[in-house]
Amino acid sequence: MIGIYDSGIGGITVLASLLKELPNEEYFYVADYQNAPYGDKTKDALEKIVTKNMDIFMQKRCKAIVIACNTAGTLKDTIRKKYDIPIIVIEPAIKMAYDRHKEKKTLILTTPYTAQSKSFHHLYKKYEMKDCKIFACKDLATLIEEGNEKKIKKYVKKLFLPYQDVEQVILGCTHYPLIQRQMKEILPQVMFYDGGLGTAKQTKRILARKKLLSTSKIGTIHFFFTDQKDRTEKFQKVLDDYTNHGQL
């Protein structure tokens, strides 16, 4: 069983890619609504939260864990030291944008926590682009969780107002790909990047190398919500919609 971890519904964007790459696996998805949102947490608080949730996966005897949360993923070095199983961490798709169009005007959207993290800035400097700006999107993940179309459109319109000349946008939070439709309405000419597919391919490579790939068709998904409020039906619907249409 593969564990998938996010603060809420954003990890669905990664799960959709995992199901394409690894359709025979069994998945256990933890959505930490008890402590969400993560973007405004301190490092110490976030580390305690993430460690507690990693223990849930260990109790379930997961063979690998995919941290499908960019904010939690900034703690990858700390987490990997504590747990002796493969831990795959999503990162903003900066390398992808760099490899394809490093000369283009680029905007990176992140949570406030990710924007300040050493892990993110190391990646940002490693693939430094000619004209690149970072914007920390306060409360956007929360709006996506709420699913209020009117508020999301208003937020996105205001967000992109100073960036009408941007040519590519990197979505540095797994929640953000869920509203690509609303973003493309404002910036229809822009290329959008997210780390979901790259994370799924990396998971497949690691499991293959360690001979941990499932040999029998399972394809089952289990959802667990830390606040004990069952949202399985909603998550399944969002997964289906995102898989079929790439949006909420």
Image (cartoon, helix red, strand yellow):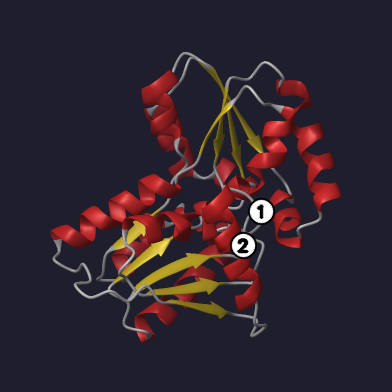
**In the picture shown, does residue 162 fall above or below 118?**
above
Asked whether the residues under the numbered discs 1 and 2 touch, taking CB atoms below 8 Å apart as contact, a structural biologist would say: yes
Read off the residue under disc 1: 248
For image coordinates 66% across by 71% down, the residue present is 234
Q: Quadrant of residue 131?
A: top right
Closest to the observer, 43 or 113: 113
Please tell me whether mark 1 sits on a helix, a strand or a loop: loop
- Which residue type does callout 1 highlight? Leu
- Which residue type does callout 2 highlight? Val
Q: Quadrant of residue 230?
A: bottom right
**In the picture shown, does residue 45 fall above or below 153?**
below
Residue 31 seen from this side: yes
**In the picture shown, does residue 170 fall above or below 178?**
above
Neighbourhood count class around disc 2 (C-alpha, 10 Å): few under 14, some 14–19, many 20 upward: many
Q: Is residue 241 left or right of residue 213?
A: right
Q: How many callouts does the rendering have?
A: 2
Closest to the observer, 190 or 126: 190
Read off the residue under disc 2: 238
Q: Position of residue 207 (x, y in %)?
A: 22, 62
For image coordinates 43% across by 18% down, the residue present is 102
Q: Position of residue 219 (x, y in %)?
A: 37, 72
Residue furthest front in the image: 244
Neighbourhood count class around disc 1 (C-alpha, 10 Å): few under 14, some 14–19, many 20 upward: some
Q: Which mark is residue 68?
A: none
Q: Position of residue 96 (x, y in %)?
A: 40, 32
- Work out which quarter of the rendered image holds the N terminus and state it: bottom left
Closest to the observer, 125 or 101: 101
Please tell me whether mark 2 sits on a helix, a strand or a loop: helix
Residue 174 seen from this side: no
Q: CA distance from mark 1 to mark 2?
A: 6 Å
